[in-house]
């Protein structure tokens, strides 16, 4: 009979004995490779160093010299009930970000507290992290009971104080277990030294944890990692690749991509070097082709049409633990990583900051400082798809990146309405303070014999777009209109490009282009540019930024939008000259340009 697996994490303040607990579990369950225990003991004797069970786990080079665990090491042991995969998470405050990485995969947790030192600052921080990561099954090991002569009152005092703390953050501990990992007390069984304790041993307590609902029993979630196109030998497949986060799917199932809301049907299930497949389930790394070819971007989440779908919003309420060197502040761009989505994000509001030591809410804070635990509102540059932690953890947990480093992590608590976005507030303020020149726009229209207009060529056919845009510019110029063509590279590598971070990319380019379009059209010119990998949300952002003016969109090639309808659309068979002529004709129809223009 195949035993089930469970992933657990062990956390606690530095030197409270997490690694010793794991070393004991490995040794006392007979899970070590043959001869490994004696090998470590012999090495300690050779170096005149007392043997410790923690050394069994110290795999990193500098752990034994520094005496602290600095990465989330994994190890394995088994009981009669199940196999355990254990993450030994760092306890030292400087390595908390590694602890988040380990704990994010866990179904349950053991939290270790030194009976002699008592509850420490990191004991509370780790409790918050487990709460924020949605780990509900937690047992507390009160370790080093030998140092307090196995005193029941010491144990009960720690149990009372820490239970009050955990209850405050909505964590209900399954049990408190007194142990001495060094002496082997309370790991497998108890001796005469703690007759007063009537509960379970550490090993028995682990076996009481309930296995999470299998991910393949949950609604289907497939974060899109990439799209691969094949062209050789008549192969026209477009394979959508990634790893299934939860659920299962079969050939013929109807699917929806979020946040774009585009729909299609699974045509085939693609896998490398395997037999033909007609279905797939979590956690397979797999590929799919679709019956109806649609344009989607990496980062979208594919779901089954007939199942519960994720939330979609650009404003989210989150619980976060901040670890960045610099504080989390408003109006600064960060990068949000959730599933395969990578999105620019800003802090909108700080709702609560909790003092982990005093269990007090710090009022009226405008930023989140290092090691703060906070409830905040974030706004992403475009809507994202996500689940809540009690639904599907993998599409709820996120990290924030600041200057290429993971600076914070947490879970999404709620999706909020996109009432007034930061961008809309910016445009309202911009228009209120817009300083007009001495020459009015109506005068410029009379002089130029045309109205100002922003024309955007978009789609995948790059060469056709560029040629058509330049031919349109030439014809307008020869007819004595004020026109300017801006290539995408001018935006990418100009306009203060050295300040564009790796996570702002297209979002920031769209913002700068929109601001520039507002200026150029206000000068009375016809402004032409091209864009490629954009979607409905990018178009909406341009529309907001170009207020009070509007723009014309020209789609060349495959449709890249979901609900947005371009002013003109052309397939790949149209030549550049005919596209340019059609756009010119549209400008005449809309009375943007005319032979005799009068007001």
Image (cartoon, rainbow, N blue to C red):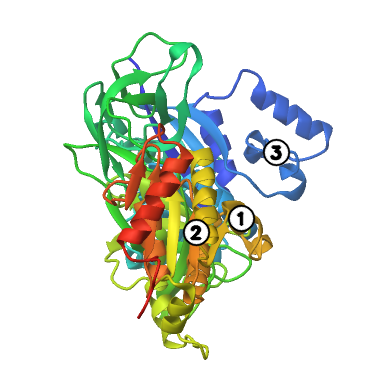
Q: Earlier in the sequence, mark 3 or mark 2?
A: 3
The residue tagged 1 is 492
Rendered view: 301 above or below 241: below
The residue under the point 51% across, 54% down is 475
Q: Percent from the top left, x then y, of residue 27?
A: 56, 29
Q: Earlier in the sequence, mark 1 or mark 3?
A: 3
Q: Are marks 3 and 2 in contact (CB under 8 Å)?
A: no
Question: What residue is disc 2 on?
Answer: 476
Q: Secondary structure at mark 2?
A: helix
Q: Position of residue 21 (x, y in %)?
A: 54, 42
Q: Which residue is mark 3?
A: 60
Q: Nearer the viewer, residue 246 or 525?
A: 525
Label 2 near label 1: C-beta < 8 Å? no
Q: Position of residue 380 (x, y in %)?
A: 42, 61
In the displayed orientation, state which residue is furthest to the left. Answer: 306
Q: Callout 1: few (<14), some (14-19), or many (20+) C-alpha neighbours within 10 Å? A: some
Are the residues flagged by discs 1 and 3 in contact, CB closer than 8 Å?
no
Which part of the image, by quadrant, shows the N terminus?
top left
The foreground one among 300 and 573 is: 573
User: Where 363 falls versus 550 (above or below)?
Assistant: below
- Quarter of the figure that contains the C terminus: bottom left
Front position among marks 1 and 2: 2
Name the residue located 66 percent from the left edge and 19 percent from the top edge.
Answer: 35
| Residue at image point 31% right, 45% down | 258
């Amino acid at each position: 009979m195949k035993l089930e697996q469970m992933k657990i994490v062990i956390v606690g303040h530095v030197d409270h004995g997490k690694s010793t607990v794991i070393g004991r579990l490995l040794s006392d369950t007979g899970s070590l490779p043959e001869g490994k225990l004696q090998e470590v003991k012999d090495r300690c004797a050779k170096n005149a160093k007392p043997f410790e069970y923690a050394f069994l786990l110290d795999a990193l080079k500098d752990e034994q010299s520094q005496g602290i665990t600095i990465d989330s090491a994994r190890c394995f042991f088994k009981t009669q009930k199940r196999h355990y995969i254990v993450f030994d998470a760092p306890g030292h405050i400087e390595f908390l970000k590694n602890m988040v990485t380990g704990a994010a995969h866990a179904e349950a947790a053991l939290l270790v507290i030194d009976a002699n030192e008592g509850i420490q600052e990191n004991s509370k921080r780790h409790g918050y992290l487990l709460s924020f990561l949605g780990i509900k099954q937690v047992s507390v090991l009160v370790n080093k009971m030998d140092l307090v002569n196995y005193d029941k009152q010491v144990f009960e005092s720690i149990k009372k104080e820490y239970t009050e703390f955990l209850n405050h953050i909505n964590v209900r501990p399954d049990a408190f277990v007194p142990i001495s990992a060094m002496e082997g007390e309370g790991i497998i069984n108890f001796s005469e030294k703690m007759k007063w304790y009537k509960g379970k041993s550490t090993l028995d307590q682990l076996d009481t944890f309930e296995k999470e609902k299998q991910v393949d029993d949950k609604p289907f979630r497939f974060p899109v990692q990439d799209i691969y196109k094949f062209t050789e030998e008549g192969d026209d497949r477009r394979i959508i690749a990634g790893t299934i986060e939860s659920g299962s799917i079969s050939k013929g199932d109807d699917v929806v991509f979020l946040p774009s809301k585009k729909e299609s049907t699974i045509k085939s299930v693609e896998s490398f070097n395997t037999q033909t497949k007609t279905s797939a389930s979590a956690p397979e790394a797999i590929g799919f082709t679709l019956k109806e070819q649609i344009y989607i971007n990496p980062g979208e989440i594919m779901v089954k049409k007939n199942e519960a779908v994720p939330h979609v919003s650009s404003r989210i309420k989150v619980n976060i633990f901040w670890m960045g060197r610099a504080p989390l502040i408003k109006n600064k761009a960060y990068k949000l990583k959730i599933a395969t989505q990578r999105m620019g994000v800003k802090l909108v509001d700080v709702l609560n900051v909790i003092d982990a030591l005093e269990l007090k809410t710090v009022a009226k804070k405008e930023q989140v400082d290092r090691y703060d635990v906070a409830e905040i509102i974030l706004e992403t540059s475009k809507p994202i798809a996500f689940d809540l932690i009690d639904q599907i953890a993998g599409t709820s947990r996120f990290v924030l990146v600041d200057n290429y480093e993971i600076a914070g992590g947490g879970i999404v608590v709620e999706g909020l309405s996109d009432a007034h976005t930061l961008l809309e507030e910016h445009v309202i303020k911009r228009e209120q303070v817009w300083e007009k020149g001495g020459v009015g726009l109506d005068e410029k229209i009379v002089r130029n014999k045309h109205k100002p207009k922003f024309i955007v060529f978009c789609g995948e056919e790059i060469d056709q777009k560029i040629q058509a845009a330049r031919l349109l510019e030439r014809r307008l110029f020869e007819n004595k209109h004020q026109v300017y063509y801006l290539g995408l590279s001018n935006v990418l590598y100009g306009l203060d490009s050295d300040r564009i971070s790796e996570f702002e990319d297209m979002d920031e380019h769209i913002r700068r282009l929109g601001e520039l379009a507002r200026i150029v059209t206000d000068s009375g010119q016809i402004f032409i540019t091209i864009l490629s990998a954009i979607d409905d949300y990018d178009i909406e952002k341009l529309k907001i930024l170009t207020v009070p003016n509007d723009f014309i969109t020209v789609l060349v090639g495959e449709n890249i939008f979901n609900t947005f309808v371009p002013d003109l659309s052309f397939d790949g068979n149209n030549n550049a000259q005919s596209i340019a002529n059609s756009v010119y004709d549209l400008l005449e129809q809309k009375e943007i340009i005319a032979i005799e223009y009068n007001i």
